Image: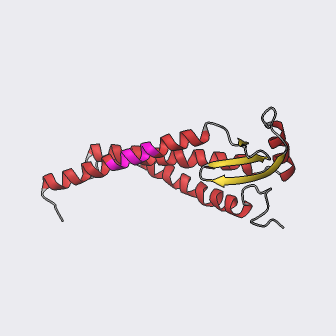
Amino acid sequence: MITASDPWQGHDFATLFTVLLAGAPALLGLAAYLCSRLSRRARRSRTSLAVAVWRDLSLAAAGATLALYLWGCLHVLFVEDQELAQECERNRPEGAPEMVGRRGDFVPLRLVCEVSDGRDFTVLIPGYVNPALAVLLSLALVCGVVAGLLHLRRRKAVGGES
């Protein structure tokens, strides 16, 4: 049994599985919605074109973020404890003393191997995942804020302040 004080923890399987189980349908739903926005009927909606474009860009960036996060989680899902230990040993920095622990973090997504001199290093999750997640989340936020501001400005211009 693994306890909270166990230094050899990875990602909690139940949490990891739940993230993947909830994230996959959310991603599919988001993709279906964005594809539906390409229809002629959706393009004729009452929403202004600028607001719709910024909103859809925000949702596309959020979808890409979710897809990339799920991709990172899949790197961890099927790896056994023995393989995690081997991965830590294989990537241990030159001159680093013995391994003393391992932990899995969900934000940022990483598997951290700890050595006895206090240093740690990340393995298994591709190095591009977390920086790309930060950029995509920032893009989603900026596009969402722009869409919201354009929507508010349009409502004020039409005289619909309510």
Looking at the image, which residue sits at the far top? Answer: 94
Q: How many marks?
A: 0
Please provide the residue range marked out in magenta: 138-145
Task: Tell me the residue at 74%/66% (across/down).
Answer: 4
Q: Is residue 40 visible?
A: no
Identify which residue, 152 or 85, lies in the foreground: 85
Coordinates of residue 81 in the picture (x, y in percent): 84, 52
Identify which residue, 153 or 142, lies in the foreground: 142
Coordinates of residue 12 in the picture (x, y in percent): 72, 60
Identify which residue, 57 or 43, lies in the foreground: 57
In screen coordinates, is 106 left or right of 55? right
The answer to if 71 sits in the magenta stretch is no
The answer to if 144 sits in the magenta stretch is yes
In screen coordinates, is 44 left or right of 89? left
Task: Tell me the residue at 67%/50% (across/down).
Answer: 73
Looking at the image, which residue sits at the far front? Answer: 117
Give the position of the C terminus as an image quadrant. Answer: bottom left
Q: Is residue 31 visible?
A: yes
Q: Main secondary structure of the magenta part?
A: helix
Give the position of the N terminus as an image quadrant. Answer: bottom right
Is residue 11 shown above or below 60? below
Coordinates of residue 17 in the picture (x, y in percent): 69, 59
Q: How is the image coloured?
A: secondary structure
Task: Tell me the residue at 79%/57% (across/down).
Answer: 7
Task: Tell me the residue at 83%/51% (across/down).
Answer: 80
In screen coordinates, is 74 left or right of 143? right
Coordinates of residue 36 in the picture (x, y in percent): 43, 49
